[in-house]
Amino acid sequence: MFGTSLITSISSAEIKHIEITQDWSAADEEQLMQWNLQIAELKKELEKEDEIASKDIDDINKSMDIERQIWELEEEITKITCPKEAVISSLLSKKLPRNMFGHIDSHINKIKNKTIINITSMEDTSHKIRLNDFFASSGIPIDITTKVDNDIIDILSFSNHRYKDLVSWLKNPSTQFIKKFYPPLKFWGMLPTLIKKDVEDDQSNLREDDSKEHKDNLFALTHSEHQIIALFSEKIKDLETQYNKLVDQTSSFLSKNDRPRARLQQQITQIQKAKKNLELPEDKEMTKSLNALFPQFHDTSITVNIARKEKKILISFFPCEDLEGIKKVFDAFCSDVTIKYKNHKSLHNKGVSLKINLNQREQLLHGISLIPSSEVAFIDAPSMAKC
Amino acid sequence: MTNQLFCYWLQGYFEISRTATLNAKQACLIEKKLRSITEELGSFTNWLLQVLEYLKRLQYRPETMNFFLPFIKRSLSTIFLHVIDNSYNTEKSHAELKAIHDGMA
């Protein structure tokens, strides 16, 4: 940051009135040098600020990457500790009516030693009672909770040591949701056929489900799984430490509302404006005269600046394509007029710029003032009317 | 000489000399005639005097003189059209009179 002296001197960079015909003095040169130094110093500070900002952006990106790594590791651990379960899902999907229940997803939680089944429900009133009734007949204690988010999801949870009992119960052809509870009225007539078909389906499924059944490691973590989990947990811990450190750094940056960048930029702009006013003050009188002289250029911006060191008048017409017309006027009043087209880089428009010797300013102004403003400029003259 | 007589003189001078450009000698002559007006200068003659003084200051630069010549001629023609011709009772139309002033008739 700056010392007070520089800040104080910057405040003196005001837009002062400059006599545009006044010669460029040693004091002006001194002032300009001082401002250039100040701008250089302010720009250095600005660069430092930008470096800090870019480092913080790096830190934010790093922390996001760490967050992703942690999430991936946690996913891997979840895959080991809570593997997907296919047997119950498959059996249940055949037992539960499709017009009432949707997606079924189950997993074994090896840590809590529980089997969890998530069932998406199509309705929100009686499904829970029906599910309770259905599973109550199994005689296995099953805890059912309902989560209502975008979907209605019933979460069923029971102890892993009753897993095989539930599978057996579900495989039993007599276990029928529709048969025992509330079939839709229109199905009553078809019921004997449906039950017969269900029994046949179940018997064929038994063989299929047996092949899917997990072996001994279904509920317990193996030694190597324990090792992987320990390794991943350790890695997650490290990553979390790194993450917290980065978040602390970036949040302290983000919480600093008084970052000096904007102030530095404002100071640079202020000095640059004062510098331009010293080196290239605007010639308002000439601008006014030229605007009156070229009323046809109503869409053209005319700017006149005095290059005090060079002792030149810089005139710009933008946008403008009538170089010849402008040249004719200025050649009438001034010698050594430099005139050229100037293309604006970003706007793809043509403009005309002129350079005239400053010592011809008065004769130019006087000459312009003598051009009659209109064809009938003199007809109202009382003395001529007497003629 | 009056303002009006000067206008007649200048009109005649342009008609006779048939000049498309103005030189230093001609400008000096016009200024001399202008300065012989004995009454208060009118708006046109006053402006013309200022133009001639300006041209003298710029040492009768041809570019400047040729720039102002059309303004001088047009302003003089306008004076005839709107002021001098209106002061006469004549059967000639404005268009005819203008053609005469412009050397077309």
Image (tube, coloured by chain):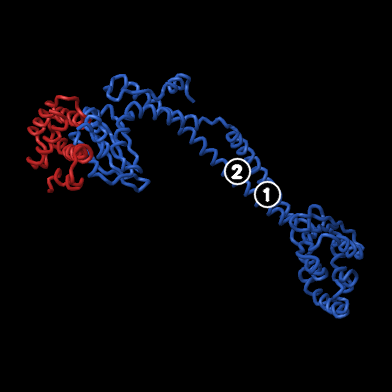
- Distance from the alpha carbon under mark 2 to that under mark 1: 18 Å
The colour one sees for chain A in the rendered image is: blue
Q: How many labels were placed on the picture?
A: 2
Q: Position of residue A299 (x, y in %)?
A: 35, 43
Amino acid type indicated by mark 1: Phe
- Chain letter of disc 1 in the image: A
Front-most of residues A126 and A350: A350
Position above or below: B17 against A86: above
- Dividing the picture into quarters, in which one does residue A238 lie? top right
Amino acid type indicated by mark 2: Ser
Q: Is residue A51 visible?
A: yes
Front-most of residues A379 and A220: A379
Which residue, given by chain and number where applicable, does mark 1 sit on? A232
In this image, A23 relative to B38: left or right? right
- Dividing the picture into quarters, in which one does residue A129 lie? bottom right
Q: Secondary structure at mark 1?
A: helix
Q: Position of residue A277 (x, y in %)?
A: 35, 27
Q: Secondary structure at mark 2?
A: helix
Q: Which chain is red?
A: B
Which residue, given by chain and number where applicable, does mark 2 sit on? A63
Front-most of residues A338 and A381: A381
In this image, A167 relative to A230: left or right? right
Ranked by sequence position, the earlier of labels 2 and 1 is 2
Q: Residue at x 76, y 62 (%)?
A: A105
Q: Residue at x 75, y 56 (%)?
A: A82
In this image, A358 relative to A264: left or right? left
* Quadrant where the image shows the C terminus of chain A: top left
Q: Residue at x 17, y 34 (%)?
A: A335
